[in-house]
Image (cartoon, helix red, strand yellow):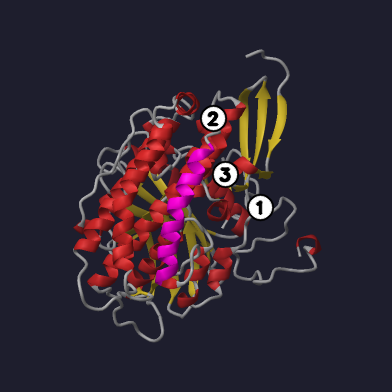
């Protein structure tokens, strides 16, 4: 655990990436937290930072009615351990983060593109990717 | 099961039963489905990237076009997330108008679901009935804001307009009429032997699996998990109204059907209460000329017709969001299709896709 922040009634915990699976498993199984529903997983790109990608996990507890946001940071080329073994729903969310931002997830069963075609080049949600795309790379799709 | 060679069959991307452009790769042993792999992305428009290049006030029309059947909920969720981020207060009348419109939208969305779900399974008559009532809701939307489908009815700080003259009476007439019409649909379906045969015990998912797959909305409640954002974390004015959250027991297609039918009744009940207690005053609060949130992030969820809709905004203190993320219930619910179709027949896949009530615009974004 590196840092905990509160804003608008939301709890955010910044954690070390290598501790992620252990922490997630604990939060899901411990009777005091019981965070059993992974509501969303999304990644943000900060190209100026040395660890440019931030992955957010929004987790909800159905019995206790509370939420938490976990954050991990990784550099380009590094990967995050998958949580799809803990919450099955993370599977497609992680594929989407891989597709649109190019973040790797170790241990993921099927890390392929999901929203874009398989032969697409680049990752559109990265900040350096222009809004109109690279026309010379994708004549087929225009 | 004959345990012969497995035949791979492509369903979609253009197929009348896939509700848009969804492709499902099926592995078949005789008529039994042994593998099922949904392939999406045919309607991907890069809305999240687009939103990063637009001002906060320009984004609601994009939200409308994600889940075009439940556009009011999409709109409401996004606008509430921005309001939360900037600390903007909404007057009570504005909150009530929002609830009324969002619930009308839920009814119209469920009517589309019921009509097309029936059509998929072979009950054609229901389609004509439900679209007759849906037309009445769309007329109400048109009278309110001029648009019928992608309504864009809400504004940061309140709503677009106050109710036009005669609108409240028209809505009252509709919600008084609706229960008798729902009885008509149920007369056609609830005890219909073909309907029971096609829906009972089809697409069963346990409560534990449903939570694990992250299902929300009627597919989650069909398995008996009591999670409705309107009750769990009330937003807008939902804490002022009395309503029940219907729950299923078996987690099959029939339970999800019953739940959506009951939800329509409950929505009508909420609208009736909101119309009775409609407070006076402004429909829109004071909003700064420029929407410039502080450097912060927010994740706001609301209960859409299909389930939990999440809106994550990361603001860097400028007039445009640094990162805009739409969590769509269709995307998540569709992922569970293989889990639901374990050992199903080919014809059941059509019923299961229908019962998940996906909108591909919402899934692909």
Q: In screen coordinates, is B77 left or right of B40?
A: left
Magenta-colored segment: predominant secondary structure: helix
| Magenta span | B124-144
Residue at x 55%, y 39% (from the top left corner): B119
Residue beneath disc 3: A106
Q: In screen coordinates, is B277 left or right of A26?
A: left
Local crowd at mark 3 within 10 Å, few (<14), some, or many (≥20)?
few
Q: Chain of mark 3?
A: A
Q: In screen coordinates, is A7 left or right of B201?
A: left
Above or below: residue A43 compared with residue B344: below
Residue B256 seen in this snapshot: no
Residue A20, horizontal then vertical, whole percent: 44, 47
- Whether tag 3 and tag 1 are in contact, CB under 8 A, the answer is no
Residue at x 37%, y 57% (from the top left corner): B104
Residue beneath disc 2: B341
Do marks 2 and 3 share a subunit?
no
Nearer-the-camera pick, B282 or B144? B144
Q: Chain of mark 2?
A: B
Residue beneath disc 1: B42
Q: In screen coordinates, is B116 left or right of B85?
A: right
């Amino acid at each position: 655990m590196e840092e905990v922040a509160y804003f608008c009634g939301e709890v955010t915990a910044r954690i070390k990436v290598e501790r992620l699976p252990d922490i997630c498993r604990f939060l899901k199984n411990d009777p005091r937290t019981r965070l059993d529903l992974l509501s969303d997983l999304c990644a943000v790109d900060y190209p100026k930072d040395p660890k440019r990608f931030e992955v957010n996990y929004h987790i909800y507890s159905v019995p206790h009615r509370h939420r938490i946001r976990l954050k991990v940071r990784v550099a380009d080329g590094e990967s995050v351990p998958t949580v799809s073994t803990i919450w099955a729903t993370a599977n497609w969310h992680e594929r989407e983060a891989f597709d649109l931002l190019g973040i790797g997830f170790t241990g993921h069963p099927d890390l392929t593109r999901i929203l874009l075609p398989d032969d697409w080049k680049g990752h559109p949600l990265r900040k350096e990717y222009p809004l109109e795309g690279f026309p010379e790379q994708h004549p087929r799709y225009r | 099961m004959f345990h012969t060679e497995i035949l791979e069959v492509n369903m979609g991307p253009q197929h009348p039963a896939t509700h848009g452009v969804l492709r499902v790769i099926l592995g078949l042993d005789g008529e039994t489905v042994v593998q099922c792999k949904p392939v999406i992305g045919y309607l991907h428009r890069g809305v999240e990237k687009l939103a990063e290049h637009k001002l906060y006030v320009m984004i609601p029309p994009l939200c409308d076009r994600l889940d075009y059947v439940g556009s009011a909920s999409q709109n409401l969720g996004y606008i509430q997330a921005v309001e939360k981020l900037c600390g903007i207060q909404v007057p009570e009348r504005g909150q009530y108008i929002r609830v009324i419109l969002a619930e009308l939208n839920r009814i119209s969305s469920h009517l589309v679901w019921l009509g097309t779900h029936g059509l998929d399974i072979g009950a054609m008559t229901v389609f004509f009935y439900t679209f007759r009532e849906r037309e009445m809701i769309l007329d109400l939307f048109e009278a309110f804001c001029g648009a019928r489908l992608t309504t864009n009815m809400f504004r940061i700080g309140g709503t677009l307009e106050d109710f036009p003259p005669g609108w409240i009476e028209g809505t009252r007439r509709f919600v008084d009429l609706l229960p008798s019409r729902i009885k008509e649909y149920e007369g056609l379906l609830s005890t219909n032997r073909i309907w029971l045969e096609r829906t009972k015990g089809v697409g069963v998912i346990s409560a534990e699996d449903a939570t694990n797959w992250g299902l929300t909305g009627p597919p989650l409640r069909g398995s008996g998990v009591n999670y409705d954002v309107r009750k769990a974390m009330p937003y807008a004015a939902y804490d002022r109204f009395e309503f029940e959250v219907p729950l299923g027991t078996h987690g099959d297609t029939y339970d999800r059907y019953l739940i959506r039918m009951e939800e329509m009744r409950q929505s009508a009940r909420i609208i009736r209460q909101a119309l009775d207690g409609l407070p006076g005053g402004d429909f829109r609060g004071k909003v700064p000329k420029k929407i410039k949130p502080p450097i912060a992030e927010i994740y706001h969820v609301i209960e859409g017709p299909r389930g939990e809709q999440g809106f994550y905004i990361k603001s860097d203190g400028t007039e445009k969001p640094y990162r805009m993320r739409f969590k769509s219930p269709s995307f998540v619910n569709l992922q569970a299709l293989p889990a639901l179709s374990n050992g199903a027949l080919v014809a059941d896949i059509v019923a299961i896709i229908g019962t998940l009530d996906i909108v591909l615009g919402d899934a692909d974004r």
